Amino acid sequence: MNQLRRLILKGGGAGGVLACALAAGLLRPSRAHAAEWNKAAFESKSLADALKHIGAAGAAESADIHIKAPEVAENGAVIPIEVTCRLPGAESIALLAEKNPFPLMAQAELAGGTEGYLNTRFKMGQTSAVKVVVRAGGKHYIASREIKVTIGGCGG
């Protein structure tokens, strides 16, 4: 027998069964629930305001937050960053760039028991300190790293 023909018949049959189950109401697509958007924090124009709106105005320095990012970014439009947090019970990780027009760049809520890890790319217009704020156990902790930008990324 032709294996490709069998594979196509199996796939078509499975797809037909799923379509019938959906039409009969046996399967219902669920909604994806995203975390609430902190509009005030993302629209803040100063680092102090952004920290205040995420509840981290008095965050304590922590050596348990490790930031892996380039010391010199040749292109400020795409800067990779990797954050690893060894604080137990990490609940969220926020990235802020001190001299960006809007300092809060990202905020990730972590599910219970999730490893405190974030890997992303961001944009900076000029040399600035990048701050990482981690909420763990109801308290906020902060770490920072200076990143030098040679070509502007935010319109520079």
Image: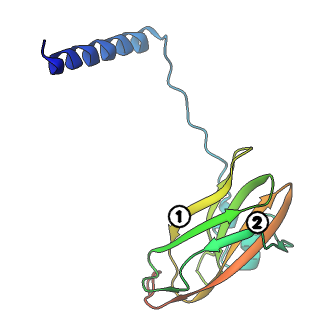
Of residues 47 and 128, which is closer to you in this image? 128
**C-alpha span from label 2 to label 1:** 22 Å
Question: What residue is pinned by disc 2?
Answer: 53
Question: What residue is pinned by disc 1?
Answer: 120
Amino acid type, label 1: Thr
Picture coordinates of residue 135 (x, y %)?
A: 78, 60
Of residues 114 and 37, which is closer to you in this image? 114
Q: Residue furthest left?
A: 2
Q: In which quarter of the image is residue 97?
A: bottom right
Of residues 16 and 50, which is closer to you in this image? 16
State the quadrant of the N terminus: top left
- As helix, strand or loop, the secondary structure at mark 1 comes to strand
Q: Quadrant of residue 99?
A: bottom right
Q: Confirm or deny contact between disc 2 and disc 1 (CB under 8 A).
A: no
Amino acid type, label 2: His
Rendering colour mode = rainbow
Picture coordinates of residue 54 (x, y %)?
A: 76, 64
Residue at image point 75% right, 53% down:
91
- The correct choice, above or below, for 134 with respect to 98 in the image is above
- The correct choice, above or below, for 11 with respect to 70 in the image is above
Q: Quadrant of residue 21?
A: top left
Dot 1: few (<14), some (14–19), or many (≥20) neighbours within 10 Å?
Answer: few
Picture coordinates of residue 156 (x, y %)?
A: 44, 88
Q: Which label is found at residue 44?
A: none
Sequence-first tag of 2 and 1: 2
